[in-house]
């Protein structure tokens, strides 16, 4: 392969820039030319292409967001959209593409691979909800942002013997809620993988109050939601002043942590090594401390479990 493209797609995540940088520099080191495709698959269909040299990716490793912009595109799923995308590849001599995004983006990468443009996916989403990998780029930074925010809430909870019910991201998965819950000493953690209710939370608050606990944090994943109603009920039943807080998109931003920068760099490097050998239709993955790769079809059919052991650790240590 002489020319490859790189794009970021779907929800943005801190560390995407570090991955773009690694892709560009690894490709150049291997004698390849790199085209940056802006706005995800939209840019591929609409010919929004830029040249990327080694210096064009200077000073981005520390930045959140993505210098290539990200987007969602329904048109890309149509035959016309796909034909436009392939025409852009032909026009610029793009022979393979590194797709940085989530499962949706990998489905697009699979479709392009099947039509003769080999693609390699890099998992990037703050939710860590991609089954084929133990780790997704952005997860660590997002969680560090959450604990910084909740530590601040905790200061005010402490001072007034209050309860804070905090919603964090994770529509289908409670990985952020679980690990940040442990990290801030949450009394209870509600995740979509379990059907615990506000009544269970109230029981836990009452039990720990008997043991002398004076302030309480309840961590709730977005997929469970309803923090204001929950806060109201906790206050009504326990008499403890309770507030709901939705952290929202603040969790998506910020300078990536060491973990995100390093893994993004490793994954970018690996993705280009695969394309260099002409291997496409793969996703890179983090497993047991190493970077692996899987067939996209196989990866999309994997199932990710919830860490029940950690959920139990959280429960036991929050009395
Ligand atoms: P993520 O990659 O973060 O999971 P999305 O699910 O929004 O985000 O997917 C990003 C983009 O990938 C979509 O806007 C669409 O262009 C493309 N995509 C998603 N699903 C498919 C699919 N089944 N076939 C082809 N392209 C898809």
Image (cartoon, helix red, strand yellow):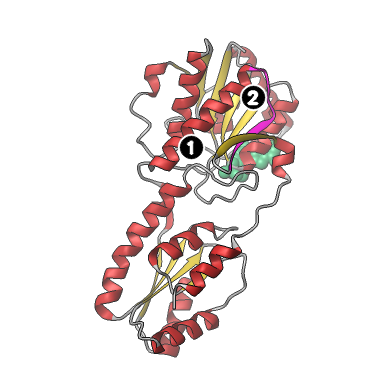
> What is the tally of numbered marks visible in this picture?
2
The location of residue 303, given as percent across then percent down, is 70, 51
Q: Earlier in the sequence, mark 2 or mark 1?
A: 2
* Nearest to the observer: residue 29 or residue 90: 29
Q: Is residue 118 left or right of residue 176?
A: right
Magenta stretch in the rendered image: 277-287
The location of residue 248, given as percent across then percent down, is 43, 57
Q: Residues within 10 Å of mark 2 (few under 14, many from 20)?
A: many
* Nearest to the observer: residue 107 or residue 182: 182
Label 1 belongs to which residue? 263
When asked about the image quadrant of residue 79, the answer is top right
The answer to whether the residue labelled 2 contacts the one labelled 1, judged by CB atoms less than 8 Å apart, is no
Report the quarter where the C terminus lies: bottom left
Image height check: is 227 above or below 109?
below
Say if disc 2 is inside 8 Å of ligand 1.
no
Whether residue 69 is visible to the viewer of this picture, yes or no, is no
Report the quarter where the N terminus lies: top right
* Nearest to the observer: residue 257 or residue 287: 287
When asked about the image quadrant of residue 114, the answer is top right
Mark linked to residue 69? none
The location of residue 32, given as percent across then percent down, is 54, 12
Q: Distance of mark 2 from mark 1, alpha carbons?
A: 29 Å
Q: Residues within 10 Å of mark 1 (few under 14, many from 20)?
A: many
> What residue is at 45 percent from the left and 64 percent from the top?
182
The location of residue 300, given as percent across then percent down, is 70, 43
Say which element carries label 2.
helix
Image region (quadrant) for ligand 1: top right
Mark linked to residue 85? 2
252 part of magenta stretch: no
Furthest residue toward left: 159
> What residue is at 48 percent from the left and 82 percent from the top?
204
> What residue is at 59 percent from the left and 60 percent from the top?
307
């Amino acid at each position: 392969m002489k020319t490859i493209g790189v794009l970021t797609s779907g929800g943005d995540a801190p560390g995407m820039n570090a991955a773009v940088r690694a892709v560009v520099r690894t490709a150049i080191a291997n004698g390849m030319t790199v085209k940056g495709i802006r706005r995800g698959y939209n840019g591929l269909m609409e010919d929004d292409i830029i040249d990327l040299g080694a210096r064009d990716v200077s000073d981005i490793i520390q930045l959140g967001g993505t210098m290539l912009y990200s987007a969602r595109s329904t048109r890309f799923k149509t035959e016309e959209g796909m034909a436009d995308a392939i025409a852009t590849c032909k026009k610029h001599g793009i022979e393979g593409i590194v797709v940085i995004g989530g499962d949706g983006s990998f489905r697009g990468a699979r479709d392009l691979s099947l039509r003769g443009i080999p693609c390699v996916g890099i998992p990037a989403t703050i939710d860590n909800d991609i089954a084929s990998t133990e780790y997704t780029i952005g997860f660590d930074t997002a969680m560090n942002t959450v604990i910084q925010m909740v530590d601040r809430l905790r200061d005010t909870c402490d001072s007034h013997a209050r309860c804070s019910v905090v919603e964090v991201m994770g529509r289908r998965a409670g990985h952020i809620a679980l690990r940040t819950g442990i990290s801030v000493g949450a009394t209870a953690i509600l995740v979509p993988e379990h059907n615990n209710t506000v009544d269970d939370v109230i029981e836990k608050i009452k039990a720990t109050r008997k043991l002398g606990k004076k302030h309480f944090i309840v961590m709730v994943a977005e997929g469970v939601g309803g923090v204001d109603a929950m806060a109201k009920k906790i206050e009504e039943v326990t008499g403890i002043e309770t507030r709901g807080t939705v952290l929202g998109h603040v969790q998506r931003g910020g300078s990536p942590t060491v973990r995100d920068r390093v893994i993004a760099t490793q994954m970018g490097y690996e993705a280009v090594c695969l394309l260099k050998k002409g291997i496409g239709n793969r996703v890179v993955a983090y497993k047991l401390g190493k970077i692996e790769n899987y067939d996209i079809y196989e990866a999309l059919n994997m199932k990710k479990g919830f860490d029940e052991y950690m959920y139990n650790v959280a429960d036991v240590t929050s009395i």
